[in-house]
Structure formats: C-alpha cells, structure tokens
Image: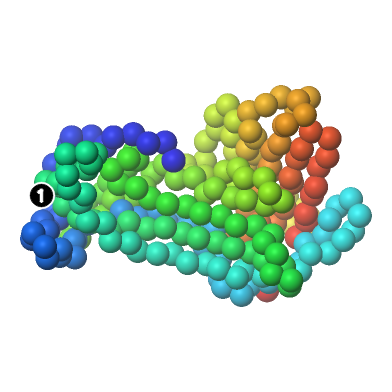
C-alpha cells in the first residue's frame, strides 16, 4: 500500500472518538480500521471451497481448495519512546488483515494472497458511523503469489497506473460458462516484455466466485489456468 501520513483533521477526529489507554492497562478502543467491504466481496472466499482449473496449453487439470481464509481483527497499542514514529498521545485502535491460501491436493500452494489495513500510514477515507468510529481503507492492494511470481492480484478502487492495469469485462465466457461483471487485473515487474527477467500476471475475479482465470507470464512463456467448476 502507498504509505502516506493521514491528515491532521483525521488525527484530531480519531483522538476525540477513541478511548485513551491508561498507563500499563490498555483498553479496547472504539476505533476500527477496516478493509473495504466491496473489495472483500471478491477475495474473501469460503474455507474448503474447491476449484477445478484446466491448463489451456496441455489440458492438465488442477484440483485445488481454499485451505486458509482468515479475516483478522488486530489490536494496536501506541508505541512509545523517542525513536518511535508513533505519537504516544495517539489512541489505540483495531485494524483488519485478510489472508488467503489455495492449495493442491498434495498441499502445494496454488495461490496465496494478503491484504492489510494500516491507519497511520495509509490514505484513509473515513466515515463516522455513530459509535464506534469506523475508518474504511480506501487504498487497498491484495498482494498475491502464484508459480513463484508475486504481484498485486487485486486492488481497490479499480484504477490503473504504470505497472497495474484494471479492466472491467461485462461478460466473459470460459470453458462453456459465461461470467458477468468480471474484473481483470494486470500487474508486471515494470520491465519490458522483451527483457529476460520480465514477468507479469493477469487475474480475472468474479464476485462471489473468486479467480475464474489466471495468467502467469514470463519472458518467453504464458501459463493460463481456466476455471471449469467450483463448489
């Protein structure tokens, strides 16, 4: 995630709305930093859901399942000391982290991903929703690793930059099944496709389903996995 310091206004609001910690006896705060719920609808997959994928080049079948799907709520206590970036006057807070692992029948990782929220170092779009005070992380990247290549496999909001490209696909047919409202995410290491160390990935996500297509690209090869079925 892009690490930017939050505005003074947001800091003041947070200080006013959250409980201060008593020395030596931290309290549970009323401040929560949450991953964007719209984005979580795509990547938060049910534990033990299975997927059957087909390699488009040779027809090889991969049978995988979700072996880890954890949305954690973590408690943060302000750091103290002159060498700490954190202001000891700031309150404690909760943040969210989501972890996903998809594995083969032999327990080899087919895909692993992580999304994290960080109040003090991210650009937060905050909303006051009564009590408690809830801040929605508005700049969130889901870092994914597959075939030993790590890229941002999903991000929200759906935008593009020099090394990441988002495309909305209203309808996409894959192996006889038509999916609607598909989001395609292309991410590369920034090199040119003609360079030997070039690598990139393309992930196609459908809400409520997960990854329906995956492309892992290197200098001279493309490995494409197509979803046949899931359940």
Q: In this view, does 115 lie above or below 1?
A: below
Q: In this view, does 90 lie above or below 104?
A: above
Q: In this view, does 50 lie to the left or right of 19?
A: right
Quarter of the image where the C terminus is located: bottom right
Q: Going by the picture, which residue comes out furthest to the left?
A: 22
Provide residue 31's location: percent of width, then percent of height: 22, 57
User: In percent of the image, x 56 and y 55: which residue is there?
Assistant: 113
Q: Is residue 41 left or right of residue 64?
A: left
User: In percent of the image, x 86 and y 52: which residue is there?
Assistant: 56
User: In percent of the image, x 15 and y 55: which residue is there?
Assistant: 18
Which corner quadrant of the image does residue 68 belong to? bottom right
User: In percent of the image, x 79 and y 33: which residue is there?
Assistant: 219
Q: Is residue 132 left or right of residue 114?
A: left
Provide residue 178's location: percent of width, then percent of height: 74, 57
Provide residue 229's location: percent of width, then percent of height: 75, 67
Q: In terms of secondary structure, where does tag 1 sit?
A: helix
Q: Going by the picture, which residue comes out furthest to the right?
A: 58
Q: Pointer 1: residues within 10 angstroms few (<14), some, or many (20+)?
A: few
Q: In this view, does 79 lie to the left or right of 147?
A: left
Is residue 127 among what the camera can see? yes
- The residue wearing badge 1 is 16
Is residue 11 among what the camera can see? no
Which corner quadrant of the image does residue 101 belong to? bottom right
Provide residue 96's location: percent of width, then percent of height: 37, 58
Q: In this view, does 62 lie above or below 95?
A: below
Which corner quadrant of the image does residue 25 belong to? bottom left
Q: What is the image's colouring?
A: rainbow
């Amino acid at each position: 995630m892009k690490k930017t310091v939050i505005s003074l206004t947001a800091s003041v609001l947070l200080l006013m709305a959250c409980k201060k910690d008593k020395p030596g006896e931290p309290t549970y705060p009323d401040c929560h930093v949450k991953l964007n719920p719209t984005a979580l609808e795509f990547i938060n997959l049910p534990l033990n859901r299975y997927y059957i994928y087909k390699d488009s080049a040779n027809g090889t079948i991969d049978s995988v399942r979700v072996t880890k799907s954890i949305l954690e709520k973590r408690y943060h206590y302000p750091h103290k000391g002159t060498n700490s970036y954190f202001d000891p006057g700031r309150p404690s807070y909760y943040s969210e982290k989501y972890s996903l692992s998809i594995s083969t029948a032999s327990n080899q990782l087919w895909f692993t991903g992580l999304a994290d929220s960080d109040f003090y170092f991210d650009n937060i779009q905050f909303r006051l929703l009564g009590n408690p005070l809830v801040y929605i992380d508005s700049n969130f990247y889901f870092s994914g690793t597959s075939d030993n290549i790590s890229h941002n496999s999903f991000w929200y909001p759906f935008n593009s930059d020099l090394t990441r490209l988002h495309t909305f696909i209203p309808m996409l047919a894959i192996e006889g099944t038509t999916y609607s409202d598909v989001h395609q995410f292309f991410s590369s290491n920034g090199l040119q496709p003609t360079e030997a160390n070039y690598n990139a990935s393309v992930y196609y996500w459908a809400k409520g389903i997960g990854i329906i297509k995956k492309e892992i690209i290197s200098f001279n090869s493309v490995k494409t996995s197509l979803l046949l079925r899931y359940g």
